[in-house]
Image (cartoon, coloured by chain):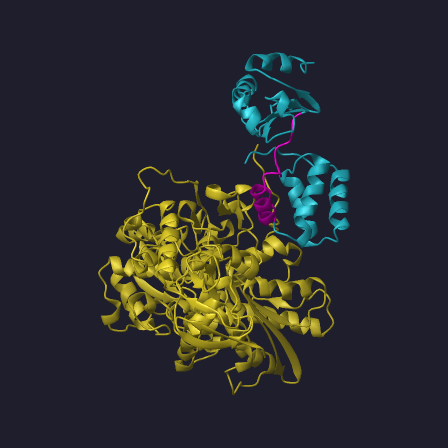
Amino acid sequence: MSSIKIELREEDVKRIKEICASFRNDPQELINVLHRCQEHFGYLPAEVQEVVSEELTVPVAKIYGVITFYSFFTMTPKGKHPISICMGTACYVRGAEKVLDEFKRELGLQVGQTTKDGKFSLSSLRCVGACGLAPVVLVGDKTYGRVAPDDVKNILKEYEQ
Amino acid sequence: METMKLTIDNKIIEVPKGTTLFKAARELGIEIPTLCYMELHDLNIENKPAGCRICVVEVQGRRNLAPSCATNCENGMVVKTHSTRVLNARRTVMEFILSDHPKECLICPKSGSCDLQNMAIRLGIREIPGTEIAKMSTYRKDTSPSIIRDLDKCIMCRRCETMCNDVQTVGALSAINRGFMAVVSPAFEQNLEHSTCTYCGQCVAVCPTGALTEVDHTPDILRALADPTKTVIVQTAPAVRAALGEEFGMEPGTLVTGKMVAALRVLGFKYVFDTDFAADLTIMEEGSEFLDRLSRHLKGDESAKLPILTSCCPGWVNFFESYFPDLKDIPSTAKSPQQMFGAIAKTYFAEKIGIGRKDLVVVSIMPCLAKKYECQREEFSTDGNRDVDYSISTRELAAFIKQANIDLNNLESEEFDSPMGESTGAGVIFGNTGGVIEAAVRTAYELNTGKKLEKVDFMELRGLEGVREATIDFNGTPIRIGIAHGLGNARKLLNDVRAGKSKFHAIEIMACPGGCIGGGGQPLHHGNSDIIKARAAAIYREDKKKILRKSHENPFIIKLYKEFLGKPNSEKAHHLLHTHYFDKKKKFIVKQ
């Protein structure tokens, strides 16, 4: 599990403590607390887990166990422009995997990773409900339909500056 | 009380509501096989994640098979524990577990005492389908000063997790990831060495496979014994003599003190000494420190902090350094008996036999895995030469004896060497929970009151309850004593101390349930707490046999102070026999 050493600012620590307090620092509420923390930080770096551990008196190993068990939680920060490729049935049969491979090649990333400059992150998801546009790619809030591997370079170019 | 009446394997049984099928069957003499379930009744320890699925049984009218460890008995249930369907399912589950387990039993350190291996034999597994085509999941090996984690052999029974979290409240280990990637690991998949692990070894003591084992130091000892320039001496902890026999087929609770001494001599140790000697020494130092703090405290001196906490147990020391560093000036500064022994051996004794400390190799036989780490702590070395060079567990000693073709059963008993083999009954009981404080009371009472103690057996300090307390009358002054074994119980007493609510003058803490007799380096109890009770009884028998039962009456301890140390807590004693503690509250380092 890769992670980046960060230093929490005082207001971050305060925010985590507030979140924990809003759940009465109840160890049973760990998953809810982690949801709220990920909402706030975008991901759950080790330092956030340590503060949660102190507040809820849950060993940090347990928290790490929960985070690595549920795929929703992540310890890797999302990029400024998170890219999601739909791998639902419709997109898949219309070549989504080739599109994904092209993104991987262009960015030098695996699914779940983020570029060193923090600009792009790559993930795959299941069905965004736009099967008529298959294969579908999302970059941030923007949707691209009928994407072919050849389009990938141009899509990335839009976000270059 | 509400009861449930049901039929298991055609036998009718009535049990209290809430009893599991597994326990009900056991009452009928039916041992349902399991890999993950574990219960140590007297110590209040239970692990039932219902994870291994080996214990499934057929319940009439129920569609799927039921895990008996996690299914409660109900009225009118008809249960079969060995129907064809059950046996087939059990076999399939076992085959799946084995398909992702290394097949290197011949060279596995757990071979012969492995629950998984025994289960494969019991279930008559003769082949593992799919081994040619299936790829096994794999995980890196992690070696710490005391414990090796070889997670390819982990079957996710979660016993270690239960011990580490629920019993010890250390929280170093947790199940992480999922599916084939699932393993038990410290936070952020750090090595054990960088986690909050105390090396108490309770995870190793309950691991059913070779996933958790101790670091084996016998090769180092073999090398030292073969070196003609070295004089190799050995010390044996009290709990070892009460358990070693188990590895040679003897009944639990058999004392093998004399045979063990004889075996060590055959192995080639030049002097066979006893950690009990150093335990007596510990009482002199710790007892004096206690009396000093007590008398100052009673006079109203606020710098004299009470309660004093014992400091013999390295797992416990690691625990408070990690979790209660703010209280690190409360424990006694006395070193553990292992380290006191090393310090005296490498100065007083080396001088006596006319050799330098570098030519003297001190080996310890311990029921403990944390002792391996303890002897490697930097503060216990002089010029890079350790006071105790190597520490091996009771299990390692048994293996060592077997390798050397020694038949322990048929050895004639021998006596420890003098002077560091001479000890009192007080030194022996260090192996049991409550023993250190009982030994301390025997001496402190006489030193404090100037009166002879007529009754040396303090029954009120004995037993297996997790937290115990007793008040001992010191000639009109009531001395309140607390005892905890298992780090989870210790935490309860420590929280009180931190909150300023503790009413005790002295507290004894041992990291392992039962004390050293239940240590992480002892022969495996395989979930049978009767074994631990038998060992405890053996220790008290050994104490009873001794003529001298108070540490300060040990003539060789008296001589040591006269010839070498001066008096307890003298400057020299402080230099050699006392230590200091560190703030080890974990700051997690996360790699880029």
Q: Quadrant of residue B331?
A: bottom right
Instruction: Please tell me which residue lies in front, B99 or B11.
Output: B11
In the displayed structure, would residue B192 be above or below residue B340?
Answer: above
In the displayed structure, would residue A129 be above or below residue B90?
Answer: above
Q: Is residue B282 shown in magenta? A: no
**Chain A, which colour?**
cyan
Q: Quadrant of the C terminus of chain B?
A: top right
Q: Which residues are magenta?
A: A60-79
Query: Taking the image as drawn, is residue B444 in sight?
Result: yes
Residue B94 in the image: x percent, y percent? 37, 53
Residue B227 in the image: x percent, y percent? 27, 50
For the colour yellow, the matching chain is B
In the displayed structure, would residue A42 be above or below residue B580?
Answer: above
Q: Residue at coordinates 74% horizontally, 39% vertically from top-left? A: A12
Report the number of numbered marks: 0
Residue B83 in the image: x percent, y percent? 36, 63
**Is A45 left or right of B535, judged from the image as shown?**
right
Instruction: Please tell me which residue lies in front, A124 or B452.
Output: A124
Residue A31 in the image: x percent, y percent? 66, 47
**Is B124 left or right of B30, judged from the image as shown?**
left
**Is B565 left or right of B395, judged from the image as shown?**
right
Q: Quadrant of residue B540?
A: bottom left
Instruction: Please tell me which residue lies in front, B19 or B331.
Output: B19
Query: Taking the image as drawn, is residue B561 in sight?
Result: no
Residue positioned most to the bottom: B454
Q: Quadrant of the N terminus of chain B?
A: bottom right
Instruction: Please tell me which residue lies in front, B315 or A161.
Output: A161
